[in-house]
Structure formats: C-alpha cells, structure tokens
Amino acid sequence: MWKTGLDGTMTWAYIHIYWKTPRLDSPDIQDSGVPHSPNSFVLRGPQGPLDTLAWEGYREGYDDARYLATLQDAIAKAKDAGKHARFVARTERWLGDLRVDADLDKWRREMARRTAALLQ
C-alpha cells in the first residue's frame, strides 16, 4: 500500500454473520472441516472466534505499517537534527528498493535496526 501512495485501510467486517454462516460444530461445514466465510477475518467457533490466514495477514500488514511509520519518523527526526545524513540517504534508497517478494521477516528486522540506529 505504501509504495502505491495509499495511506489507510478499511475493514469490511471482522466477522460477517448471516443466517447461512455455519458454526464450526455445524454439520454444514465443508469437507476440510473449515466453514467457508469469505467476508470474515475470523470464524465462529463453539468457544469463541478463531482467527484465519486473512486475519493474520492483515495483522502483520498493520504491524508492518507501524514499523514503517516509526522508521519514517526516525528519518524525519534525523534530518531535522542534521544527523546521520549518509545513513538517512542509504535508508531512503533501501526503502525505495523494496520488492513485493521481499522476505518480510528480514525486512522487519532491518527496519527495526535502521530505526534504532537513526534514533541514537
């Protein structure tokens, strides 16, 4: 989202319940044992909501946006203070080179490392 210039998201529904939405203990669930609910981030279960891959993806994306915002804030503070000019330039180039197939765990660690370095 960030590279396309978007700056927010909108969740349609955390869980979408209507009369046909099966519970996990319902005989109407799919053969895989997982009810199909394309409009929900979570599934209804007998003990409460269960998260889904869609929910975990959204959660990780939200965390990534927070990492990015913190790094961008650290860059701005370093620029305002006249500190770390070369490292700021390298970090901005690094952000610009982000690929859609990046290893996101490595990318998050690198964002945290760069943020910490800029805040020193």
Image (cartoon, grey):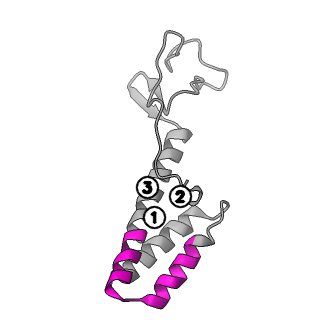
- Numbered disc 3: secondary structure: helix
The answer to whether 83 is drawn above or below residue 44 in the figure is below
Return the x and y of residue 70 as percentages of the image width and height: 38, 67
Q: How many marks?
A: 3
Proximity of marks 2 and 1: CB atoms separated by less than 8 Å: yes
Q: Residue under circle 2?
A: 2
| Horizontal arrangement in the rendering, residue 116 relative to residue 35 (left or right) | left
**Location of residue 33 (image quadrant):** top right
Residue nearer the viewer, 3 or 30: 3
Return the x and y of residue 111 as percentages of the image width and height: 47, 71
Residue nearer the viewer, 77 or 13: 77
Query: In the image, which disc is placed on residue 63?
Result: 3
Magenta range: 72-95
Return the x and y of residue 53 as percentages of the image width and height: 55, 41
The answer to whether 113 is drawn above or below residue 59 in the figure is below
Sequence order check: which comes first, mark 3 or mark 1?
Answer: 3
| Horizontal arrangement in the rendering, residue 37 relative to residue 114 (left or right) | right
Residue type indicated by callout 3: Asp
Residue positioned 63% across, 72% down in the render: 97
Q: Does the magenta segment cover residue 23?
A: no
For the residues carrying marks 2 and 3, which lies nearer the camera in this image? 2
Residue positioned 43% across, 55% down in the render: 63
Residue type indicated by callout 1: Leu
Q: Report how far apart the C-alphas of labels 2 and 3 lie in the structure.
A: 13 Å
Q: Residue under circle 1?
A: 68
Residue positioned 59% across, 18% down in the render: 29
Q: Does the magenta segment cover residue 78?
A: yes
- Numbered disc 2: secondary structure: helix
